């Protein structure tokens, strides 16, 4: 009896202590914000801060960005319609980061474009509204629709789906990041749908106890607890995105649950739209790798190969196919934006995606065009239907790798090989001369895959804060870091950096090279060129007085046929590719032009450049050539004082087959 009484007193005392602690916490502590810049929300887990007014900048200058009282982009929600028909159409967009689009100007935003086009086409007023937020999932969008749907009373609901984000966010089994741990998940079979979380008990305590929420925030700030379900969330996210296109993963394990719950959420949105007497459209926005083959997708594809997902096993149309099947099965309208984006993707054209692989100000208007055409009942003329998308694939944005040079000079005007995060330097800035520098993080360069060592050349400006660390990495291959302790020229060399699994045709003939300077908001090194150095060759002289550069496709093996070419030479010019014995060369003063005695010439191959100043040719290496050779291209140029122009020369030593 006494034992029971003591236990009862202890429990009462514990309850009193917890109650007092909670009361003090509610008076003394504000509701903690676990994940900046998000605001805590008991039902949604988190939401964007309300009434934000920002001045952002892009290449064209400054522009305004604002959110409404609910943290979504655009205007505030109006009150419910009072009349059955007031002559105004309301189109409600629901989506996550792709719809929120902080990097897109308001006049290019898909909702604004839809509003403008639908007003003109229908002849009546159209109001576009949005429920959006960075990292918002479809479950959160469904909860918000149920909360505000009757107040908004939309005529149409456009569900903006980005499969890389929304499919894995449909089940807690694929949670990897902090936002995944905070957000709710609407799961379960039809008729018994429920809301769950990654950590249900911890979420319940956070929502009902200010003391626990404050304790959790303090422990997270000190590194004692973690919000993310996995330790390396960024790496897990990359692997999760790669698995989205694997047909084998789609029908097993957590991905099978993700696709099943994703289809059920689409049905939930259909039912909510029916209850609100609104039409529903599912707008499927593809990822960059599904639309174009460019530098960022080259990095992603290399990562997928290294992770064990061979290109042959990937189906880049898999998300669109499964979403189309689900919509067809449940009578839901949909548009696959991959069709029009692939049509617009072309070499030399405007980029449709920005940093992070999100639609930019060029791609967003096409989403608005597709939605406006659907609402106005116009036929699909842009290839957003099932047959057009599933029968196509990503468009190559890089030139043919077979005719590309060994080395890329990163001067202004040669940006077709550069990914994002680069800043071009057009003049002698900070004593470094022209080139490019990494703006933040690591920038990627696309190089035609060639044998030899990878060589990066650059200059450390006089205004740089030393020391600097220059890191060169071939994703899936080798990497090298060099500490730069003085200003001036530098080189970073990586011996044979390309594994056999990354050679053509696995990466379209290209390899991605990532370069980081470690400067972080201060002056970093200027990268002049990135390329492959063929064994046994070296360049002769300085580039002063030269017209173009010469490259060789492989080491010179006695008795073999070797391909060579020129880059940035005189345009539409005819000339000769000269191969001569090196002892007979005589450099002329002041430039890198080399004259040779006609008796020392081994081969002279006709060569003609195109409109871009590029050309290729092949020549035979004699089996008995015992001396070093010099290779140089000469072109007849009438405008030149000398009547001809030359490329920078290459000196090479031929090898026997057993020496390679």
Image (cartoon, rainbow, N blue to C red):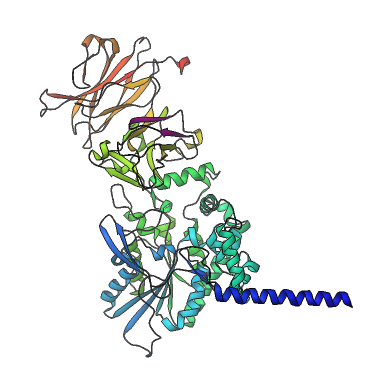
Q: Give how far across and how far down residue 637 sits, in percent.
A: 14, 27
Q: Give the position of the N terminus as an image quadrant.
A: bottom right
Q: Is residue 112 above or below residue 350?
A: below
Q: Give how far across and how far down residue 424 sits, in percent.
A: 28, 44
Residue in the picture at 47% in, 42% down = 302
Q: Quadrant of residue 133?
A: bottom left
Q: Is residue 30 above or below residue 601?
A: below
Task: State the predominant SS element of the stretch in magenta.
Answer: strand
Q: Visible in this render: residue 642?
A: yes
Q: Give how far across and how far down residue 32 sits, in percent.
A: 53, 68
**Which of the pair 71/571 is nearer the observer?**
71
- Relative placement, left or right, of 229 versus 437 is right
Q: Give how far across and how far down residue 286 sits, in percent.
A: 42, 58
Q: Within the magenta stretch, is there residue 477?
A: yes
Q: Within the magenta stretch, is there residue 553?
A: no
Spot the residue most to the bottom. 83
Q: Which residues are magenta?
A: 476-495
**How many labels, in total?**
0
**Which of the pair 649/574 is nearer the observer?**
649
């Amino acid at each position: 009896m006494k034992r029971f009484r003591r236990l009862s007193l202890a429990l009462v005392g514990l309850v009193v202590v917890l109650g007092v602690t909670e009361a003090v916490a509610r008076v003394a502590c504000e509701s903690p914000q676990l994940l900046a810049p998000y605001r805590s929300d008991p039902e949604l887990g988190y939401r964007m801060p309300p009434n934000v007014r920002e001045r952002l900048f892009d290449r064209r200058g400054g522009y305004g960005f604002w959110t409404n009282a609910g943290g979504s982009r655009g205007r505030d929600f109006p009150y419910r319609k009072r009349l059955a028909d007031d002559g105004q159409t309301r189109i409600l967009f629901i989506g996550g980061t792709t719809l929120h689009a902080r990097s897109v100007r308001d006049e290019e935003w898909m909702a604004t474009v839809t509003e403008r086009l639908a007003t003109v086409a229908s002849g009546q007023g159209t109001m576009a509204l949005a429920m959006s937020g960075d990292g918002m999932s479809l479950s959160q969008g469904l909860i918000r629709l149920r909360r505000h749907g009757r107040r908004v009373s939309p005529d149409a609901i456009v569900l903006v789906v980005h499969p890389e984000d929304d499919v894995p966010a449909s089940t807690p089994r694929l949670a990897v990041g902090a936002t995944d741990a905070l957000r709710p998940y609407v799961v379960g079979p039809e008729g018994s749908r429920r809301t769950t979380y990654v950590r249900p008990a911890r979420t319940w305590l956070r929502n009902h106890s200010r003391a626990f929420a404050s304790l959790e925030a303090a422990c997270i700030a000190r590194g004692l607890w973690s919000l993310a379900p996995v330790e390396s969330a960024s790496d897990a996210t990359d692997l999760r995105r790669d698995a989205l296109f694997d047909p084998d993963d789609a029908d097993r394990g957590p991905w099978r649950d993700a696709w099943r719950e994703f289809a059920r959420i689409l049905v939930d949105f259909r039912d909510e739209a029916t209850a609100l007497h609104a039409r529903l459209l599912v707008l499927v926005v593809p990822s960059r790798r599904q639309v174009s083959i460019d530098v960022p997708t080259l990095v992603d594809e290399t990562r997928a190969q290294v992770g064990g997902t061979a290109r042959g096993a990937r189906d880049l149309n898999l998300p669109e196919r499964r979403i189309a099947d689900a919509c067809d099965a449940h009578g839901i309208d949909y548009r696959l934006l991959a069709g029009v984006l692939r049509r617009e993707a072309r070499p030399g054209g405007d980029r449709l995606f920005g940093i992070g692989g999100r639609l930019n100000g060029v791609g967003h208007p096409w989403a608005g065009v597709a939605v406006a055409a659907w609402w106005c009942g116009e036929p699909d003329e842009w290839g957003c239907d099932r047959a057009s998308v599933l029968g196509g694939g990503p468009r190559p944005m890089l030139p043919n790798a077979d005719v590309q040079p060994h080395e890329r000079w990163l001067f202004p005007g040669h940006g077709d090989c550069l990914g994002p995060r680069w800043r071009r330097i057009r003049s002698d800035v900070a004593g470094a001369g022209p080139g490019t520098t990494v703006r933040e993080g690591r920038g990627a360069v696309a190089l035609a895959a060639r044998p030899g060592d990878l060589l990066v050349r650059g200059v450390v400006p006089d205004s740089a804060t030393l020391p600097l660390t220059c890191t060169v990495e071939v994703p899936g291959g080798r990497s090298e870091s060099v500490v730069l302790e003085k200003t001036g020229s530098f080189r970073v060399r990586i011996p044979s950096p390309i594994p056999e699994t990354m050679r053509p045709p696995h990466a379209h003939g290209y390899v991605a090279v990532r370069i980081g300077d470690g400067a972080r908001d201060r002056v970093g090194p200027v990268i002049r060129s990135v390329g492959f150095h063929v064994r046994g060759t070296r360049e002769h002289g300085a580039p002063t007085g030269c017209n173009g550069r010469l490259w060789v496709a492989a080491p010179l093996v006695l008795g073999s046929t070797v391909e060579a070419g020129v880059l940035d030479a005189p345009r539409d010019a005819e000339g000769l590719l000269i191969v001569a014995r090196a002892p007979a060369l005589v450099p002329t003063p002041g430039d890198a032009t080399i004259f040779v005695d006609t008796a020392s010439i081994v081969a002279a191959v006709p060569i003609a450049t195109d409109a871009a100043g590029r050309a290729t040719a092949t020549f035979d290496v004699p089996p008995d050539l015992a001396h070093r050779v010099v290779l140089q291209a000469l072109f007849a140029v009438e405008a030149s004082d000398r009547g001809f122009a030359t490329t920078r020369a290459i000196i090479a030593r031929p090898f026997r087959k057993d020496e390679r």
